[in-house]
Image (tube, rainbow, N blue to C red):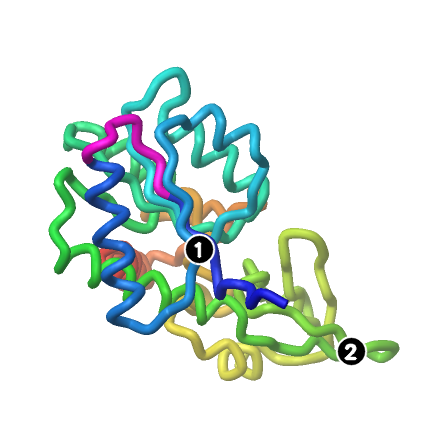
Amino acid sequence: MEKESEFRILICDDEAYYLRDLSEKLKGYLQDRKIDAEITASLHADAVARQKMPYDIAFLDIQMRPLDGITLARTLRQYNERIIIFFVTAFPEYQDDVMDFQAFRFFEKPIRSERLYTGLDKALQYRDSLFVDVYVKTDSYVKKLHMDDILVVKTEGREICVVTGQETYTLWDTLEEWETKLNAPYFYRVHKSFLVNLHHVRQYSYKEIMMSNGEYVPIPSRKQSAFHRVWFDYLKGR
């Protein structure tokens, strides 16, 4: 039986030169790091969208026709919500659009090998961190969750609510216990009653955070400067 690759990488660019260049550099990275991955390289974004394939990492040119890279990225997230997106373009004015989409990183063409290696090293560290298991224990069952499935942990009265994208678990725990359990650097105690997953922050202002499920988390005035630093350090680390 043929061994299945560790993960799938997509490169989509409607310029053949850049597609070949990035493909060769990616092959070199995988060989150097001794990583087994399947690379798919395509000139046609619309064909990729029709395939409905769940990729783990994607390098997408922004300016493509008839389907641009940001539109393709939204489609790819329907088949793997944890896909790591790198946007690639020769036009740096698109960087604001990329940041709004919360891509992992933005590369200008042509991609330098050292930037590619650094970006992929961080992407794989991030990917590994997503699959750490934690356990929710209630009176009637024990449920295993991936750490990154958790959006918010919050206190409501004497109880704790662990909020995922699909369900909310009400527990007789303390927020301090969950802060210790969720010790990954992307969890932050933004309020005495809220622990948030920075991966799922979709909008941020000095007074509040909007999470990916639409929930708003308040930022106390005494924590606003600290969270501002944490948030931008997080973005720089991506």
Name the residue tied to disc 1: 38
The circle drawn on residue 105 is none
Residue in view at x 63 percent, y 68 percent:
1
Q: Is residue 231 magenta?
A: no
Residue in view at x 14 percent, y 38 percent:
109
| Residue 108 image point, x, y percent | 15, 40
Q: Which residues are magenta?
A: 11-17
| Residue 132, image quadrant | bottom right
As drawn, 37 above or below 52: below
**Which of the two residues, 210 or 140, is positioned nearer the viewer here?**
140
| Residue 87 image point, x, y percent | 29, 40
| Residue 227, image quadrant | bottom left
**Which of the two residues, 174 or 232, is positioned nearer the viewer here?**
232
**Which of the two residues, 147 or 223, is positioned nearer the viewer here?**
147
| Residue 3 image point, x, y percent | 55, 68
Residue in view at x 50 percent, y 53 percent:
82
Name the residue tied to disc 2: 142
| Quadrant assignment for the C terminus | bottom left
